[in-house]
Amino acid sequence: MRIEGTTETGYELIRDGRPFVIHGVGGTARLDVLAACGGNTVRTWDAETALATVDGRTLLEQAHDAGITVTVGLWLEHERHGFRYDDAARVAAQRKRVEEAVRRIKDFPALLTWGLGNEMEGPTGRGDREAVWKEVELLARRIHAIDPNHPVMTVVANVNPDKVRAIREHAPSIDILGVNAYAGAAGVGNALRRMGWTKPYCVTEYGLPGPWEVDQTDWRAPIEPTSRRKAGFYNVATTDILADTKQCLGAYAFLWGSKQEATASWFGMLLPSGEKTIAADAMAEAWTGSWPNNRAPILGDTRVPLANRRVKTATTFDVLAPYHDPEGDALRYYWEVRRESTDRREGGDAERVPEEVPKCIVRADDSGNATIRVPSAPGAYRLFVTVRDGKGSGCIDNWPFFVEL
Amino acid sequence: MISPIPLPCLWLATVAVFTAGVGLAEPLDFGDHTSATLTGKAWKALGEQRYDDALAYTGKCRELYMAEALKQQAALTDFVPAEKAHDSWALNDVGTCLFIEGQVLEKHDKPKAAATYRELATALKFCQCWDPKGWFWRPAEVAAEKVKQLQFDAKLE
């Protein structure tokens, strides 16, 4: 694995003697589906995930079986979590952990690049703390010494001039700058060039606008884009990012899997039960120019009168969220009401899934009609609908509402 | 008519105040007919889901100030720096109104929304809109992305 080229000629990642454009995702689920969609690589945030086994096979081995490569994350601690980059003992322990991981993993054939740290400069602020970047430099040199065959990428939360200058000055051994960017992902290349970054870059997390970037209700619940709209964000962002063929080595979309972040559905391209959604189909279209087999259901015009509204306790509403299946598969609808998340974190830290509120679904059919009785307890909630085609594809959408006396 | 007060479009792009009283009729009032007033009223109507009203305000802003906006656009070769952005008041307000118009049209007429965003992205590409969070954003750049997303959405049909 190597990088060829210059700022003037453009850069290429070379794998097995051939140019390799990163058509990637963050996450490790359903690698078979990813490969079928045209994806060629996944990214982990730590080495433990890459070495975790299922049926006795590590993720790196499973990926290799599926024809997928892996950017292996080497987790670096965050000062916002209490770590100190001027604490010699803890820094030494971290170095030992990183070096051991590199020695263990460097010869796996699925390994694509090293992802040294993820947003360890902090998701907010200038991100130019010298001690952090000097440590990244030291580790990059050690990784190169142990494994000269794989490039080292460090991953930051978006870019600003101070951060880029600090990396250029203090971490010159970094081969690739990975940038996590959401609403502004397509502009990362131009922003980096304005800030004087001349090496290759990769967009390491992107997708749709995050909960911090969208409209909110008057009780501050972020309004999640519909599944259909999300597909547009993923498709256009991927196409735009990959259009920079000179300096951009590719991109990892977030998230191939599902997780609770503001809601249970915001970033997941798969349902918690593993079905691919329309966002995955949109990625496939951007990567390959064609749709995958068995596309996901597509949301039509909705009528959800309680959406984004304050409503009276224990009232009922008729709602409609019709989906159509491109192959005409019969669809099954599952409606549920959950409390609005109160366990909100920053930087993608793990959040608790709010509990489902029982007895809110009065009736529902398989055409997208349902009658919802809102909870009797005042507070913020969301109505979710999950739709499955029974053949490996599905979709999920939600609408916030607030119950008051 | 040219706005006597070259105010910037001091309106948040992401106005979204949703209450139980949304959509209630409110008589149209063009106020002093300045581009800033019309733009402000259009944002407010959009936020309150009074979509016909929003289109009425943006339409009036277009009618009165499009010629001046095009003149201001033609005089530019790049985005003006933030401290001079207010000089392009018509460009900024009409551009913002086209963006609001696109937002409304997206709800019921996606092809027309795409056409509006395309017009904004090509004819008024140096317009800027002040976000009270502390910076100017560029409606034409967002509109260009919207055009691509609507083109993708059309493939889903």
Image (spheres, coloured by chain):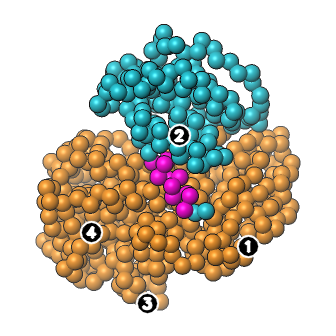
Which amino acid type corresponds to the residue marked 1 in the rendered image? Arg
Q: Nearer the viewer, mark 2 or mark 1?
A: 2
Measured Cα–Cα span from mark 2 to mark 1: 37 Å
| Residue marked by disc 2 | B116
Secondary structure under the numbered disc 2 in the rendered image? helix
| Residue marked by disc 4 | A114
Q: Nearer the viewer, residue A80 or A264?
A: A264
Secondary structure under the numbered disc 1 in the rendered image? strand
From the image, which quarter does the C terminus of chain A lie in? top right
Instruction: Rate crowding at label 1 as few (under 14), some (14 to 19) or many (20 or more) other CA atoms within 10 Å.
Output: some
B36, above or below A129, in the image: above
Chain letter of mark 2 equals: B
Which amino acid type corresponds to the residue marked 4 in the rendered image? Trp
- Outermost residue toward the bottom in this view: A56
Residue A397 image position (x, y, % from top left)? 65, 59
Instruction: Rate crowding at label 2 as few (under 14), some (14 to 19) or many (20 or more) other CA atoms within 10 Å.
Output: many
Q: Nearer the viewer, mark 2 or mark 3?
A: 2
The colour applied to the residues of chain B in this rendering is: cyan
A111, above or below A125, in the image: below
| Residue marked by disc 1 | A332
Measured Cα–Cα span from mark 1 to mark 4: 42 Å
Chain letter of mark 4 equals: A
